Image: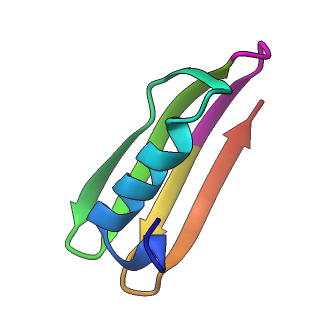
Amino acid sequence: MTAHPLQSLAAYSQCVAEVLDRPPVRRSTVAVWSVSPYTGIAEGEVWFSSGFRLRLREELDFEARLITSYGYEV
């Protein structure tokens, strides 16, 4: 995993892919994309083998290395 996953779109995308490539995750539709050179969105759903489903949306600021807005629903 990268030193700071919010340093760039590529780094955050890699971090998300690594987190979702674990045995408890059965399926995922999470996507990360760029809105501008300095911002991005992560959004989708994750289904776990335990039966839980996580829905998420994050607004990302790569320049400030912050998740500026988020919502999670289980």
Q: Residue at x 59, y 63 (%)?
A: 69
Does residue 55 show up magenta in the picture? yes
Q: Is residue 13 magenta?
A: no
| Along the viewing direction, whichever of 43 and 15 lies nearer the viewer | 15
| Quadrant position of residue 29 | top left
Quarter-of-image position of residue 30: top left
Question: Which of 54/10 is in front?
Answer: 10
How is this picture coloured?
A: rainbow
Residue farthest toward the bottom in the current orientation of the protein? 64
Total count of labels: 0
Q: Residue, x 68% and y 27% (percent of image)?
A: 24
Is 15 drawn above or below residue 36 in the view shown? above
Q: Position of residue 44 (x, y in %)?
A: 49, 32
Quarter placement of the C terminus: top right
* Residue 19 located left or right of residue 11: right
Relative to residue 59, is residue 50 drawn left or right? right
Q: Which residues are magenta?
A: 49-56
Q: Which residue occupies 48% across, 60% down?
A: 59
Compared across the picture, whether 8 is left or right of 73 comes to left
Please name the residue shown 59% across and 27% down the image: 46
Residue 21: x and y, percent? Answer: 50, 36
Q: Residue 6 appears in which quarter of the rendering?
A: bottom left
Q: x, y (%) of residue 68?
A: 56, 70
